[in-house]
Amino acid sequence: MPDARERLAYVSQMTNTAAHRVLGLVEQSKPVCADVAGQGRDLAETLGRMAGADNLDVNRARALLRLCATYAARAADFAQQQNDALGDILIAQDFQDLSGQVIKKTIDIIERAERQLVTAFGPVIDADRTSQVAEATHGQTASLAGPQAPDKALQQDDVDDLLASLGF
């Protein structure tokens, strides 16, 4: 059981680290996205106005081209930053494969411990619950219900009684 607990704590730590990394990258990227989008809208509006102007001279056209060049450079830098951020997010999610492996090994540890308990204390262990866990972990039709509602969960007295009946 200590090994299973350590493995689950490791999965929890990996998940927490990745979640914070992803959230940080998204928070960092959102203002830059809004800024580039605003500049793009402003530039499009200016281009539209100037394209319809009767008095577009060479100097104004050059100024407009400088604005376009500045925005194009900013957009290229932005695209590279976003590509880097997406790569970092992808790397931050690599824990999924590792955590799946750790969870599978933890389930195996728990199944072995449960089988040993059933073998040693068969009548004390709820056989129906044992078969549900076995079916769920072997991909059959049973499904785990997730966290129990407080009125369905074992109370401390129930746990104490079970441990006492096992000689603890």
Image (cartoon, helix red, strand yellow):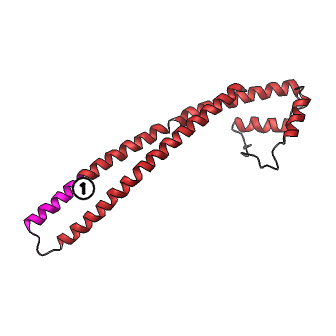
Tell me the residue at 87%/39% (across/down). Answer: 158
Q: Which residues are magenta?
A: 55-72
Tell me the residue at 12%/66% (across/down). Answer: 60
How far across and how far down the image is residue 33, in percent?
37, 54
**Nearest the eye: 152 or 111:** 152
Tell me the residue at 42%/40% (across/down). Answer: 88
Asked whether 109 falls inside the magenta stretch, the response is no
Residue found farthest to the bottom: 54
How far across and how far down the image is residue 75, in percent?
28, 52
Q: In which quarter of the view is residue 90 placed?
A: top left
Secondary structure beneath label 1: helix
Q: Amino acid at mark 1?
A: Tyr
Q: In the figure, is residue 29 to the left or right of 2?
A: left
Which quadrant is the C terminus positioned in? top right
Q: In which quarter of the view is residue 50 placed?
A: bottom left
Secondary structure mostly seen in the magenta stretch: helix
Q: In the figure, is residue 138 to the left or right of 152?
A: left
Residue that mark 1 sits on: 71
How far across and how far down the image is residue 98, in percent?
55, 32
Which quadrant is the N terminus positioned in? top right
Q: Residues within 10 Å of mark 1 (few under 14, many from 20)?
A: some
Is 126 placed above or below 56 here? Answer: above
Q: In the figure, is residue 18 to the left or right of 6?
A: left
How far across and how far down the image is residue 155, in percent?
84, 42
Q: In which quarter of the view is residue 135 placed?
A: top right
Tell me the residue at 56%/39% (across/down). Answer: 16
Count every numbered label the image shows and give the total.
1
Is 34 placed above or below 116 here? Answer: below
Is 124 placed above or below 58 here? Answer: above
